[in-house]
Amino acid sequence: MLPAAIAAGLVYLRMNGRRPPARSACAPGVGGMAKLRVKFTFPPERIQEPIIWEVGKRFDLITNIRRADVTAEVAWAVLELEGDQKDIDDGVRWVTEEKGIRVDPVEDSIIEG
């Protein structure tokens, strides 16, 4: 089995064709659960939908919103996703492929403090 940081990086490469997240974007969570820090950027047509709640509910993830900005035209949220690595991978895949949300890795310094 791949370490969480490598597995998360491979998910990003498959989904976005971009560089995988920095190692600090993936960290072990509480009780052996994986944790991933990401930024969701929502298209205007998805702003009113409870997507963060839904990804947590559908994939049994703990979603911790660290920062966010929402207007009528654009919305983004920096959050931590915590749960089984497979559930995190499946949740990120669902958010990007089914809901059209852009998902980018986040460095620790953005959410600390």
Image (cartoon, rainbow, N blue to C red):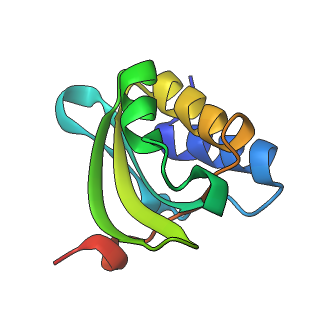
* Residue 3 picture location, percent across and down: 50, 36
Disc tally is 0
Residue at the farthest right position? 17
Q: Is residue 2 visible?
A: no
**87, 24: nearer the viewer:** 87
Residue 61 sits above or below residue 81 on the image: above
**Which residue shows up at 51% across the image and 46% down it?**
5
The answer, for residue 10, to whether it is visible in the render is yes
Residue occupying image coordinates x 45% and y 20%:
58
- In the rendered image, residue 109, in percent from the top left (x then y), is placed at 33, 79
Q: Work out whether 74 lies above or below 100.
A: below
Q: Choose between 25 and 3: the one closer to the eye.
A: 25
The quarter of the displayed image where residue 32 is located: top left
- Image spot of residue 71 (x, y percent): 46, 74
Question: With 10 as the anchor, is 95 left or right in this view?
Answer: left
Rendered location of residue 10, percent (x, y):
70, 43
Q: Could you tell me which quadrant the N terminus lies in?
A: top right
| Left or right of residue 48, residue 63 in this image | left
Residue for point 74% across, 38% down: 97
Q: Nearer the viewer, residue 58 or 61?
A: 58
Which residue does the image show at 52% across and 23% down from the upper left?
Answer: 86
Which quadrant of the rendered structure holds the C terminus? bottom left
